[in-house]
Amino acid sequence: MAPKHGLDSFKSEQEQLAKRAKSSATPTSRSATPADPGAKVPFEVKYPNMDESMKRSAAEQELAAHADWQVSPFVAKGALREGELDQHYTVVPHVEWESMKKYNNFIIQGEVYKNDQFVFVRGENTPKDKDTEGQPKDFWVARILQVRAKNAQNVYALIAWMYWPEELPPPGIKQKDMESRDSGKRTYHGGHELVASNYMEVLDVLSFAGKADVYHWLEEDDNLSHKLYWRQTFNRKTQALSKLREHCICGGYFNPEKTMFICDNTECKVWLHKECIIDDILSKTYSRLIEGESGTPDTKTNGIARTNGKKTKGKNRHKGLFTATIKDDGDGAPIAIIKDLRPGADPKTWEEAIKCPKCSTELQ
Ligand SMILES: [Zn+2]
Ligand SMILES: [Zn+2]
């Protein structure tokens, strides 16, 4: 999905065009959201420069003079500081915006919407016949900050956007947990995960497709079922994601759709990635069977443990020699099944109890 309005501002036009060509079925901007494609929302959100010590144009000063302060409803657990996402904004044309009355709630098709509510928003490419039950990613998700109306036909909501991780722009510096080069989605992002932001927009409430149930997950449990949730924020000003709770021996994060194992030692209690446990098992197997007790390469395995006469080092030194899987049927301790791939190996396959890579306690 292409990033929505404003997110792409740091990239060249060419990059944007390339992206559009690649995914022509995705919206290029969330500005084009009204249910009636002909009815463009007449309001726009600007973020004025409030720094009086800077030289500002008359237009910039005018914007600043009419700015409001928005306290973000999103405070992530790993926020740099409280109020990180709070900001000044001005809706233009401001005279028209300010002249409209504010409402605390409104009704569309018999459903009452309130301030602070999460909503599904129909984009220009959202299939007309789609409801929000099946494929939530056909829709955008927003949180209502303020509602104003000119009359019963013209009701507008100031909203803060939530992003699907695939819509986030790739980080400026390459990160090892990126899923691909052209999006900000990370390997820890789950399929039902949204990222809260301080990108704001004014929408015609007729573009709303229903209420959304979005849970603020504090990463204290893994009891998420299939709810939509958010735990992280994306800051418009810094283009940075908020920090998450670090787990495992790798210091990585938790993708709630992937299994993690928890060490039962009450002193340790570390949450472990399956892949990290497997790496640890393979590395220990390598040390035991190839390097021997002394920790030096076993000469008998010369040519396997050595590549071009050099001792192989690093995480993947066991590659092509051993594989491991974890058997975990829910009851009882998980077991490692290790295969020795070397020709003539005996035994070829065996089972082992799994030890916590951090404290060496057996997993129960
Ligand atoms: Zn890990
Ligand atoms: Zn442990």
Image (cartoon, rainbow, N blue to C red):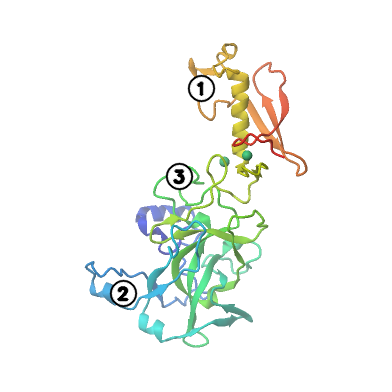
> Along the polypeptide, which appears first: circle 1 or circle 3?
3
Q: Amino acid at mark 3?
A: Gln
Secondary structure state at the residue bearing disc 2: helix
Q: Is residue 197 above or below residue 154?
A: above
Q: Amino acid at mark 2?
A: Ala
* Contact flag, marks 2 and 1 (Cβ < 8 Å): no
Residue occupying image coordinates x 39% and y 52%: 15
Residue, disc 3 = 175
Whether the residue under disc 3 has CB within 8 Å of ligand 1: no
Label 3 secondary element:
loop
Q: Which residue is mark 1?
A: 312
Q: Is residue 314 above or below residue 343?
A: below
Q: CA distance from mark 3 to mark 2?
A: 36 Å
Cα distance in 3D space between marks 1 and 3? 26 Å
The residue that label 2 is drawn on is: 64
Ligand number 1: quarter of image: top right
Between the C-alphas of marks 2 and 1, the distance is 61 Å
Is the C-beta separation of discs 1 and 3 under 8 Å?
A: no
Please state if 221 lies on the left or on the right of 82 as rendered: right
At x 57%, y 17%, the residue is 294
